[in-house]
Image: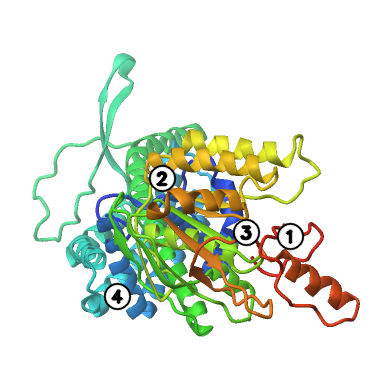
Amino acid sequence: MKARLMSADSDFETERETRAGEEELIQDLDLLVLWRAMAKGDAVIFESVRSALLAGVATTEEVRYRQAVYRDCREQSEVVREIYALANEAIAEKKKSWRGLGIDSNSGEPLLHASIKELEMFVGVLRRLRRITEEHAGKFSSEGFARFFATLRHELDDAYFNEVTGHLRALRFRDGVLASAALGDGNQGIAYVLRAPKPRGTFLHRPMVAKPSFSRTIPHEDQGGHYALAGLRNRVTSLAANALAQSADHIGSFFAALRRELAFYLGCLNLHDTLVDRGLPVCAPTPHPIASGKMEAHGLYDPCLALRTTAAVQGNDLCADHVPLVIVTGANQGGKSTFLRSMGLAQLMLGAGAPVAADAFAAALVEGVWTHFSREEDATMTSGKFDEELQRMSVIGRHIRPHSLLLCNESFSTTNEREGSEIATEIITAMTEAGITILFVTHLFELSHHFFAHHRDTTRFLRAERGADGARPFQLIEAEPLSTSYSKDLYRKTFDANLGRPADTSPAPGAEHVHEAAGSPRIRT
């Protein structure tokens, strides 16, 4: 019996190997903030959404399969939460059972009784699951839930419950244990077989002639005889006990898988409700096949930023169909890095079959999302920041695959402009030729100007806006790169305010190119 709510033909597992660059991805996109908001303190939901977002799926059909199941979860959230609670209850009760305390699988009688108790508990939960199926299955329309409820109807019919109840009653051996054996070398018993107990006959159906038999009663004081009899009983019941334990494990595995899969959808519901309560849009993204080159967003925003602040969050638009490179330039702290994170999160959510924080989002599935963000100075570094950047890019270069998405935030800005631009140009050219899509946030004017002058047809150029008064509207527009990042705005805003003078918001010279001062406060990137 399989849940199969995450995929039509495979199981959903949360245990997976960590790939190269995964920890950097989690850090750069603030994924822990997202997962914690989705989990709301539930460890199972946290692990499910974590695994789903990092693993993703391979085809648009799989994404649509999950989207349809999620749509049912939204429309029937109370029923879904009731099923999830049942799965939690079953697993919690299983952990309390005697088997959960480490009973030896070779100890037939104790294992048998523990497995009987466990199965009786499972039967009670399965009956309640069957009741939910009968009452609510007609309200669900997705393929995933249709198959799930059809399986429950087929597997959990009245005949199943009657048979299981009968077996559990018989295995209590209230009328004693009936077994057969053969004699081996030295008249030792071999080939023990546990037999079904004979039904008690009525007076009219009792045989008129009793078959010859031999019986022996062990005296009460014969301690050795009682030990031998207990060992014999344990031996003949061990096969039934192991079979019963395997049956209990099978049902327990079903509830564990059901809980893992429903946990992902409940995490999506939690995120959806949190963002909608803030008045923010959430959409069902449109998946396109790998290598189709689709990338379009409307009102896209960073959900992690929305989860950390009560201030208004600005969305952005992007249309970069069949374009392998997007370069983002403009004013310091104008929303460039936030936009980059929003794109990475949207791509991960799309690939997992989850809703996206946007008015609308459509993109090709990717083989993986990679990040190369600038790092703060770290006293524990054994080499310089520039060497550290090169090392991380080297790891990406060895492991990234075609049709992946690479997000670069101020990469190679730790060296001089000419060297940084040359290195970045070579890396961008090599990777885009290999079929990798790149979104590159940079203040390197030589870099952005090179691609604007020579690769304008295959590159989109976005620029963070700056108001006439120096304010940051956190809005990106499609525009030519400028040679200034308006760092003087931030300098004046910080130091003039500290000196008690009105800030001078006059535009910085057009040819100026000053990086953000290391000691200036982070406002928003």
Q: CA distance from mark 1 to mark 4?
A: 59 Å
Location of residue 271 with respect to 62 vertically, above or below: below
Going by the picture, which residue comes out furthest to the top?
A: 185
Q: Secondary structure at mark 2?
A: loop
Proximity of marks 1 and 3: CB atoms separated by less than 8 Å: no
Q: Nearer the viewer, residue 31 or 171?
A: 31
Q: Amino acid at mark 2?
A: Ile
Q: Say what amino acid the circle numbered 3 marks.
A: Ser
For disc 3, the neighbor class at 10 Å (few under 14, some 14 to 19, many from 20) is: many
Q: Residue at x 46, y 44 (%)?
A: 16
Q: Label 2, label 3: how many angstroms apart (C-alpha)?
A: 27 Å
Q: Is residue 71 visible?
A: yes
Checking the image for residue 516, the label placed there is: 1
Q: In this rendered view, identify the residue nearer to me: 468 or 69.
A: 468
Residue at mark 4: 132
Q: Which residue is mark 2?
A: 436
Left or right of 334: which side holds 169?
Answer: left
User: Around disc 4, counting alpha carbons within 10 Å, would you say few (fewer than 14), some (14 to 19), or many (20 or more)?
Assistant: some
Task: Tell me the amino acid under the disc marked 1.
Answer: Glu
Q: Residues within 10 Å of mark 2 (few under 14, many from 20)?
A: many
Q: Position of residue 438 (x, y in %)?
A: 46, 50
Nearest to the observer: residue 345 or residue 120: 345
Find out whether the residues at labels 4 and 3 contact each other: C-beta distance under 8 Å.
Answer: no
Q: Check disc 4 and report its element: helix, strand or loop.
A: helix
> For residue 320, what is the image quadrant?
bottom left
Q: In 3D space, how far apart are the residues under numbered discs 2 and 4 (Cα atoms)?
A: 47 Å
In the picture, the disc for residue 483 is: 3
Residue 42 visible in this rendered orientation of the protein: no
Mark 2 or mark 4, which has the lower sequence index? 4
